[in-house]
Amino acid sequence: MTKDEAPQPAKVYFADLRARAAGRNRTAKIQKLFEAAGFGDVVKKDDLTAIKLHFGERGCDTHISPTYARAVVELVKAQGGRPFVTDTNTLYSGSRHNAVDHLLTAVEHGFDYAVLGAPVIIADGLDSTNVLEVPIRGKHFEKVKIAGDIVRADSLLVLSHFKGHELAGFGGAVKNLAMGCAPRAGKQDQHCVRFVVEPKKCIGCAECVAVCPVGAATMQGKKAVIDKATCIGCGECLTVCPKKAMSIDWRTEIVPFMERMVEYALGAVTGKTGRVGYVNFLVNVTPDCDCVPWSDAPIVPDIGFLASTDPVALDKACLDLVNEQAACPECKLEHGIHSGEDKFTALWQWTRGDMTFVHGAAVGLGRPEYELVRV
């Protein structure tokens, strides 16, 4: 390939949050991003269009606003598409473990037809068995398990709240595709890590026992233990443990986890070339995923909304914009991380969020090189 034939950086469109007139409010910004990113070519007339987002675990209130989802629904309808808003059931126990509880949680958080103007469908079905296998060419997988209604959709718009994550470092478009479009069996394929308890740190609170979906965490006397043969690696024990007594071999296990996640993201969009668009919301950038039943203080000020047809470039642009900020006072970044410093590595020391970009490029999901275009 000659220099002139080298791939051009993906365009990532950015709208800040300044608004001094009605035409610059947040829903108007979403419309401008939709148009600038070419999503009119993604959604065709009569398409069954999946709008993939995360409804938030019960107790989380920093998930994407239903108002933003409604704006996207209206834009899809304007293109002649038939939108539905969707997510998949969780691997861990909680308020979204099956479609009934999941839909109740969605409604409690404002995601219902009266607000959205579109139906809410749990893409992997009542008990996460609406599954189709998708062939890919990956390092770890030759085929992956994706929620049936995601696969069957004609087009896909992925709306992601960009924030931290204890295993992945951060969650954005790629993680929303990977974990978010996979049924429980697919989520388990990705969670290749297994946890152990560090006894000196354990205070015997039994929070891990309460959330473990398979009974791998139990109490032995005043300390928790995890049966590694039973553990499915969902990571909920790591999330809820107040003393961070849960441990894995970060140096050997985190890279395969990230690679598997990226390959599942590839599976979610396989067969939809030119039919997928992504919007990331850089507001309420919390330390934790929206899967936890709380919302910690944001680590940086609200930044804006970004859109692209390349999920890898989009996540890289979001990461760069977050790292440009100085940390908010009184947030989990306790030591005052300055502008230019890596926020998510400071939060979660052993994570390897960079593998999103490295392996994403290797398997053809996207490329981290981007051109940021303000709209």
Image (cartoon, rainbow, N blue to C red):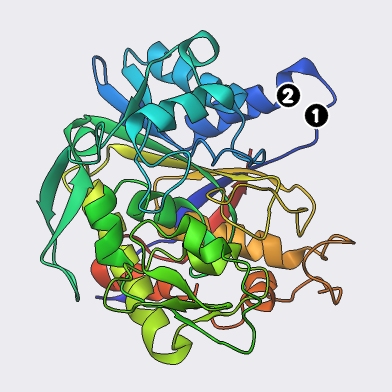
Quarter-of-image position of residue 326: bottom right
Residue type at mark 1?
Ala
Q: Nearer the viewer, residue 189 or 58?
A: 58
Across and down, in percent, residue 63 comes to: 60, 39
Q: Nearer the viewer, residue 184 or 3?
A: 184
Q: Residue furthest right?
A: 329
Q: Is mark 2 in CB contact (under 8 Å) with mark 1? A: yes
Q: Residue at x 28, y 73 (%)?
A: 362
Position of the N terminus, as image quadrant, is bottom left
Give the residue at mark 1: 19
Above or below for 271 versus 331: above
Separation (CA) of disc 2 from disc 1: 5 Å
Residue type at mark 2?
Asn
Q: Seen in the image, is 344 located left or right of residue 48?
A: right
Across and down, in percent, residue 168 comes to: 48, 68
Give the residue at mark 2: 25
Q: Seen in the image, is 22 located left or right of residue 123?
A: right
